C-alpha cells in the first residue's frame, strides 16, 4: 500500500496466488492439488487422497495429476526413504515475473 499525502491518494495493490491466476491452464484435479499444496508445505500422495475435500480419485489418479504438475514445474518432489514428498516449486517463473513487474511498477510510479 502506498499513501501519497501530497495529492491525498492511496494506492493498494492486491496479488492473487499462483493457482488462482492460472486456473484456466489447470484441470479441476490440478487446481485442487495446487490449493492443497498452498495449504500444506510438504505432502505426500496419501495426504491428498485422505483429504476430506478430495473427490478426484484414489492414489493412482492423484499420482497422475501430481506428476503432471511436477512436469509443468509447478510442484517439486524429493524422495525420502521409499516415498516422495511434494511441495510448491520454489523457482517458479510466474512468481519471478510478478516480482519483476512489481519492481518495475514501483520504480515507474515514483
Image (cartoon, rainbow, N blue to C red):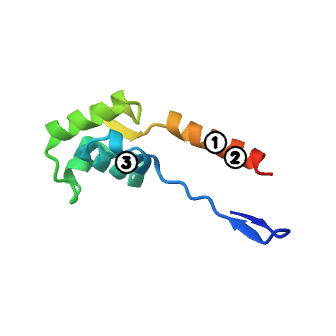
Give how far apart the Cα atoms at labels 2 and 3 are: 29 Å
Q: Secondary structure at mark 1?
A: helix
**Mark 1 or mark 3, which is nearer to you?**
1
Among the 4 quarters of the image, the one containing residue 96: top right
Question: In the picture, which quadrant includes the N terminus?
Answer: bottom right
Mark earlier in primary sequence (1, 3) = 3
Marker disc for residue 37: 3
Say which of 15 and 30 sits in front. Answer: 15
Say which of 84 and 72 sits in front. Answer: 72
Q: Residue furthest front?
A: 7
Q: Residues within 10 Å of mark 1 (few under 14, many from 20)?
A: few
Q: Residues within 10 Å of mark 3 (few under 14, many from 20)?
A: many
Q: Is residue 57 above or below residue 80?
A: below
Q: Residue at x 24, y 45 (%)?
A: 29
Residue at the spot of label 2: 105
Q: Is residue 93 above or below residue 102?
A: above
Residue at the spot of label 1: 101
Across and down, in percent, residue 77 comes to 37, 33
Q: Secondary structure at mark 3?
A: helix
Q: Residues within 10 Å of mark 2 (few under 14, many from 20)?
A: few
Disc 2, disc 1: CB below 8 Å? yes
Across and down, in percent, residue 2 comes to 73, 62
Q: Secondary structure at mark 2?
A: helix
Q: Please give left or right for residue 54 compared with residue 104 in the image.
A: left
Q: How many marks?
A: 3
Marker disc for residue 64: none
Across and down, in percent, residue 99 comes to 62, 42
Say which of 93 and 49 sits in front. Answer: 93
**Mark 2 or mark 3, which is nearer to you?**
2
User: Can residue 91 be seen in the rendering of this structure?
Assistant: no
Amino acid at each position: 500500500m502506498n499513501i501519497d499525502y501530497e495529492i491525498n491518494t492511496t494506492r493498494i495493490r492486491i496479488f492473487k496466488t499462483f493457482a488462482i491466476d492460472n486456473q484456466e491452464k489447470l484441470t479441476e484435479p490440478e487446481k485442487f492439488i495446487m490449493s492443497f499444496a498452498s495449504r500444506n508445505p510438504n505432502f505426500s500422495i496419501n495426504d491428498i487422497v485422505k483429504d476430506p475435500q478430495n473427490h478426484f480419485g484414489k492414489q493412482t489418479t492423484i499420482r497422475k495429476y501430481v506428476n503432471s504438475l511436477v512436469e509443468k514445474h509447478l510442484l517439486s518432489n524429493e524422495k525420502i526413504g521409499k516415498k516422495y514428498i511434494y511441495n510448491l516449486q520454489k523457482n517458479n517463473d510466474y512468481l519471478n515475473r510478478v516480482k519483476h513487474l512489481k519492481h518495475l511498477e514501483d520504480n515507474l510510479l515514483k
